[in-house]
């Protein structure tokens, strides 16, 4: 079963530092996403990415956040000047088509803790 | 815009049935259902695209009403492995996907 791989599984960073969360989506998928889930709360959309550019982003995805697909396989989320409230589980997801008619495949997540 | 789920939490004994509802104030393009176990990623269960559609596999099925504003997930003869948090989700426009508020399901022996 193809899967989405995320690294690292846990990341602890000091407030104000930059972090990069990495994801390897399923190889034939074309649409890529980042979501976050604060402990015990709902899963929140951050950004969608297609054809090497952002398709949509939410209000959470402010100018401290950026995404990149540097080499055709990795899909990264960078957070600059991290804040305590960035602490959450970050999930990468991918889908074959727009509208995700076959559903989204999620990675197992990166737990980010900002201290 | 976030779909609202009910109930927020339910506890079942093995073999009992459950229904989880997902409602929106506006018509949905589609509705997805996911299950998330504690500390793990959400896992896709199924998607419904058409008003009036019903779909299912094994003992888990779902329906989408004609107006496409409400979906229900049906779990019959529940098993311990069904425990987790169930999320509906939908797209209103483009690629921005909204998860519902979630329903915690606990199956006990």
Image: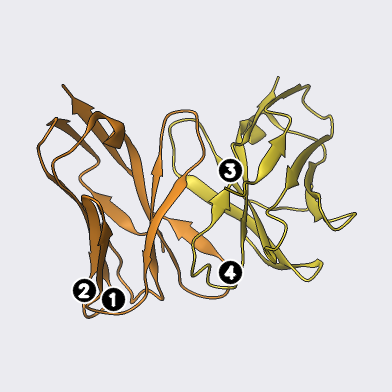
- What secondary structure is found at the residue carrying circle 3? strand
Q: Which residue is mark 2?
A: B65
Q: Are marks 2 and 3 on the same chain?
A: no
- What secondary structure is found at the residue carrying circle 4? loop
Can residue A52 be seen here?
yes
x, y (%) of residue A74?
81, 49
Q: Are marks 1 and 4 on the same chain?
A: yes
Q: Which residue is mark 3?
A: A36
x, y (%) of residue B54?
23, 70
Q: CA distance from mark 3 to mark 4?
A: 16 Å
Chain letter for the residue marked with disc 2 in the picture: B
Q: Please rate how many residues cluster around mark 2, counting C-alpha atoms within 10 Å: few if below 14, some from 14 to 19, many from 20.
A: some
Residue drawn at (70%, 67%), measured in percent from left and top? A30
Q: Are marks 1 and 4 in contact (CB under 8 Å)?
A: no
Of the numbered discs in the image, which one, if any, rests on residue B68? Answer: 1
- The tint chain B carries is orange
Q: Are marks 3 and 4 in contact (CB under 8 Å)?
A: no
Residue drawn at (21%, 80%), measured in percent from left and top? B66
Q: Please rate how many residues cluster around mark 3, counting C-alpha atoms within 10 Å: few if below 14, some from 14 to 19, many from 20.
A: many
Q: Are marks 2 and 3 in contact (CB under 8 Å)?
A: no
Q: CA distance from mark 1 to mark 3?
A: 27 Å
Q: Which residue is mark 4?
A: B95
- The tint chain A carries is yellow
Q: Are marks 2 and 1 in contact (CB under 8 Å)?
A: yes
Q: Are marks 3 and 4 on the same chain?
A: no
Q: CA distance from mark 2 to mark 1?
A: 5 Å
């Amino acid at each position: 079963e193809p899967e989405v791989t995320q690294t690292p599984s846990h990341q602890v960073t000091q407030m104000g530092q930059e972090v990069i969360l990495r994801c390897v989506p399923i190889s034939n998928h074309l649409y890529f996403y980042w979501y976050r889930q604060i402990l015990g709360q709902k899963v929140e959309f951050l950004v969608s990415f297609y054809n090497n550019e952002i398709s949509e982003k939410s209000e959470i995805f402010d100018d401290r956040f950026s995404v990149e697909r540097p080499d055709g396989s990795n899909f990264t989320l960078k957070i600059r000047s991290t804040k305590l409230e960035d602490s959450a589980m970050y999930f990468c997801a991918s889908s074959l088509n727009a509208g995700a008619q076959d559903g989204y495949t999620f990675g197992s997540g990166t737990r980010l803790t900002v201290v | 815009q976030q779909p609202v789920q009910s109930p927020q939490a339910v506890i079942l004994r093995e073999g009992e049935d459950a229904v989880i509802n997902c409602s929106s104030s506006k018509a949905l393009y589609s509705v997805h259902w996911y299950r998330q176990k504690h500390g793990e990623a959400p896992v896709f269960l199924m998607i419904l695209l058409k008003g009036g559609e019903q779909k299912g596999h094994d003992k888990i099925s779902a329906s989408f009403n004609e107006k496409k504003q409400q979906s229900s997930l049906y779990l019959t003869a529940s098993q311990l492995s069904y425990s987790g948090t169930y999320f509906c989700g939908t797209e209103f426009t483009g690629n921005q996907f909204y998860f519902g508020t979630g329903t915690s399901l606990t199956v006990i022996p």
